[in-house]
Amino acid sequence: MDNSRRTAFVAGVLFIMTFITAIAGRLLYGPVLDDPNYIVSAGADTQIAFGALFELLLIIANVGTALWLFPILKRQHEALSLSYVAARLVENTFIAIGIVSLLGILTLRQEGADAGSLVPVGE
C-alpha cells in the first residue's frame, strides 16, 4: 500500500468515525435536548456523560481528519488546505463549547436535586 493510499484509507476511517460519534452523541443527548423539565426531573446522567465521551471522540476524529488530509490537499492549494484545517479546528471549538454547556446542565441538575431536598421552595 503506497503512502497516498494509506493516507486516504486512514482519512476515510476517520470520516466514518466522525459520523458514528456525532450521531451517537446526538442520540445520547436526547433527554437533555428533548425534555424541557430535564433539570428538575430525574435525569439520565450516565447517558449524558457517555454522550460527552462520544463528542470528545468526535473532536479527536475531526482533528485527525484534517491532519491526515492536509498533505494530499496541500498538493493542490496550500492556502486552502490550511483553511480547511483551521475550519475543522473552529468546528471543534464549537463542539467543545457544546460539551461544556451540556455538562453544565448536568451539573446544574445534580446540584439542584441536592439543594431541593435540603431547602423547601417558597420558605
Image (spheres, rainbow, N blue to C red):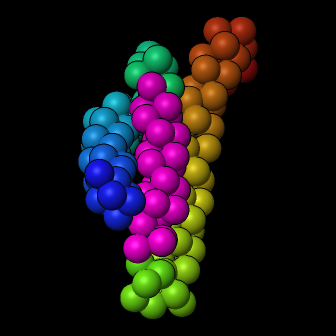
Residue 64 percent coordinates (x, y): 49, 53
Name the residue: 58% across, 35% down.
103
Number of numbered discs on residues: 0
Q: Residue 37 colored magenta?
A: no
Residue 67 part of the magenta segment = yes
Image quadrant in which you'd find residue 108: top right
In the image, taking residue 41 as reference, residue 120 lies left or right, namely: right
Q: Residue at x 48, y 72 (%)?
A: 71
Instruction: Measuring from the top left, give residue 118's x and y in whole percent.
Output: 71, 9
* Vertical order, 91 against 23 (above or below): below
Which quadrant is home to the C terminus?
A: top right
Q: Nearer the viewer, residue 107 or 75?
A: 75
Q: Is residue 25 left or right of residue 104?
A: left
Q: Is residue 67 above or below residue 6?
A: below
Magenta residues, start to end = 50-72
Q: What residue lies at 56% left-to-right and 65% top-to-bottom?
A: 89
**Which residue is nearer to you in this view: 96 or 118?**
96
Towards the viewer: 102 or 79? 79
Above or below, comparing residue 88 to residue 54 in the picture: below
Which of the 4 quarters of the picture holds residue 100?
A: top right
Horizontal placement of 49 versus 36: left or right? right
Between 61 and 51, the residue placed more toward the observer is 61
* Main secondary-structure element of the magenta-colored stretch: helix
Q: Position of residue 87 (x, y in %)?
A: 51, 74
Q: Is residue 66 left or right of residue 25?
A: right
Q: Residue furthest top?
A: 118
Q: Residue at x 62, y 38 (%)?
A: 104
Quarter where residue 33 is shown? top left
In the rendering, at what x and y percent does residue 32 appear?
A: 41, 35
The answer to whether residue 107 shows anywhere in this view is yes
